[in-house]
Amino acid sequence: MKNSLKNILTISASILFFTACDVERLPETNISDATFWRSETDIKTANNYLYTFLPDFNTDDNWSDDAFGLASNNISDGSRLAPATATADFNNQYLLIRAANNILEKGPKTGLAAATLDRYLAEAKFFRAWAYFNLLQRYGGVPLITKTLDDTSPELSAGSATRDAVIDLIYADLDFASAKLPTATALGTADYGRIAKTAALAFKARVALFEGTRAKFHKYGDAKKHLTLAYNAAKAVMDSKEHDLYTGPYFNLFQYEGEGRANKENVLVKQYGVSLTDRVVSQNYCRATLENGNKSPTKALVDSYLMVDGLPMEKSPLYKAPVLSTDVFVNRDTRLSDDILKKGDSYIFTNPVFSMSSLVFAKTGFTFRKYWNIVDWNNQASFIDRDLIRYAEVLLIYAESRFELDEAITDADLNLTINRLRKRGGVAALTNDFAKTNGLTMRDEIRRERRVELAQEGFRYWDLIRWKTAEIELPKPVLGNYFFKEFGTTVKVNVTKDNFIITQDASFRKFDPNRDYLWPLPINEIALNPSMKQNPGW
């Protein structure tokens, strides 16, 4: 199943000539153009390098109110300063852009038939769009570079492009990609893991939803234009019939059982492989991040999971204050049990059955379970792929964009999207009458479903940014689990008056709405290019 990945990562080692320390002054390839760019193998080799930029497992959720690490996070609590030098958040995106531009310029030299060539150019444009969206989310308008540069290129001293110019390029690249890439069915098992037409459409839907809701709630630009693009792109993926929700247990969606083209929920994944005896690339997310407390769920996230009657805890007659740690999971959305470790779950080889989170590591008293695998923990290596785009996200984009366009959504559209996800959590369906009868806000319930379904997958911070709710949610205290007697007395913690763990007090948290909705540009980049202007407040 992972032979395509093995080829990608083995080949990529031979083309490191694309990388360099300086973002915009990369040298020409060390393999001369006279001996490269002659065949489909050459351009495929170059494209394989692009796949190495797909993001690994990370702790980005710590930026939000969904997770907390071993110490406070300076993005989450508002204490960060503008970086002196460019970090990977900035540099790696321009490395990827440069590599993609190089392929777009040199690829036609291969003399391939138009249809074959366009497929590889489409992959390059997808990755260029991926990089520019990562920059747009963080910095807004950034330098727009669409060709390879040398030391004399005037683009090196140009200022940042407008936000609209950046997103227009992203849309254009993704439109080309979705028109020229093969379907997931055509890629089949042999080329599983490569970018398909639906991946380009789904990513366009993600980008357009971000920009549409950001424009709407931050009050700039043409929100309706972007929301319409998001809706249409999500609908195109749904209408393609190339994807569907995983039919197995939700927990297995994030295990080896959920891998490959057989699971049609996979739209784009970061692949790992192949085995302990044939190790190309592996991850150690379960042991190095989850068990070690580098990313632990908060009370705010856990509380967002509904009771099975479809009501939040504060409204449901099914909710009972917990006495034992397992009570947290009683009569709840079953995805909570799939996402968070509970007593009785498989744990680690030296302690096979989970009891309670160690407060030495899990500062919130909760531990994430998604992607947890006891065998991989013992091996200190896992080959479980990371989901980057799932069909579930497409359904959520469809529902949210539909609602935000008219501030209304039909029960039929809810059944097509939100209720399919709630069903696999064993939660009662959401209807307009149900929301009205129970005093629920439809927007809040659509956002809640997104938070629960995509928990631990790196979306929450950016959702708070685009909804303009970061200024409300991030300054709140970070609370953890109820301090049960089962935790013991080895570690002393601060608790609220109702006995919930205080992981970080509100007095240490702030969010400046005039500054923190954009990230600071690296100071050295502005020194190198004075035409670039720092974002407001930094």
Image (cartoon, helix red, strand yellow):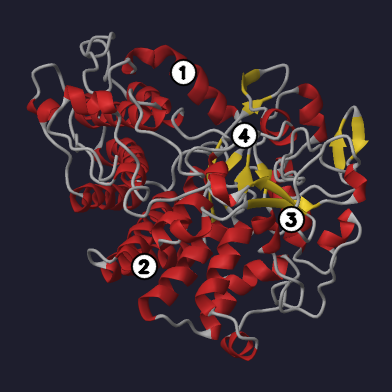
Crowd tier of the residue under label 4, counting other residues whose Cα lies within 10 Å: few below 14, some 14–19, many 20 or above: few
- The amino acid type, in three-letter code, at marker 2 is Asn
| Image spot of residue 412 (x, y percent) | 54, 83
**Residue 49 lies in quadrant:** top left
Seen in the image, is 502 located left or right of residue 93? right
In this rendered view, identify the residue nearer to me: 314 or 278: 314
Viewer-nearest of labels 3 and 1? 3
Crowd tier of the residue under label 1, counting other residues whose Cα lies within 10 Å: few below 14, some 14–19, many 20 or above: some
| Image spot of residue 336 (x, y percent) | 74, 58
Q: Are marks 1 and 4 in contact (CB under 8 Å)?
A: no
Disc on res. 375: none
Using the numbered discs, state the Cα–Cα distance from disc 3 to disc 2 in whole angstroms. Answer: 46 Å
Viewer-nearest of labels 4 and 2? 4
- Is 96 located above or below residue 171 in the figure? above
- Is 532 located above or below residue 440 in the figure? above
Disc on res. 232: 2
- The amino acid type, in three-letter code, at marker 1 is Ile
Using the numbered discs, state the Cα–Cα distance from disc 4 to disc 2 in whole angstroms. Answer: 42 Å
Using the numbered discs, state the Cα–Cα distance from disc 1 to disc 2 in whole angstroms. Answer: 37 Å
Q: Label 1, on which residue?
A: 11
Seen in the image, is 108 located left or right of residue 341? left
Does residue 223 appear in the picture of this structure? yes
- The amino acid type, in three-letter code, at marker 3 is Thr
Q: Label 3, on which residue?
A: 496
At mark 2, the secondary structure is helix
Q: Label 4, on which residue?
A: 71
Kindly identify the residue that appears in the image at 51 percent across and 51 percent down.
Answer: 459
Using the numbered discs, state the Cα–Cα distance from disc 1 to disc 4 in whole angstroms. Answer: 39 Å
Mark 4 / mark 3, whichever is N-terminal: 4
Does residue 243 appear in the picture of this structure? no
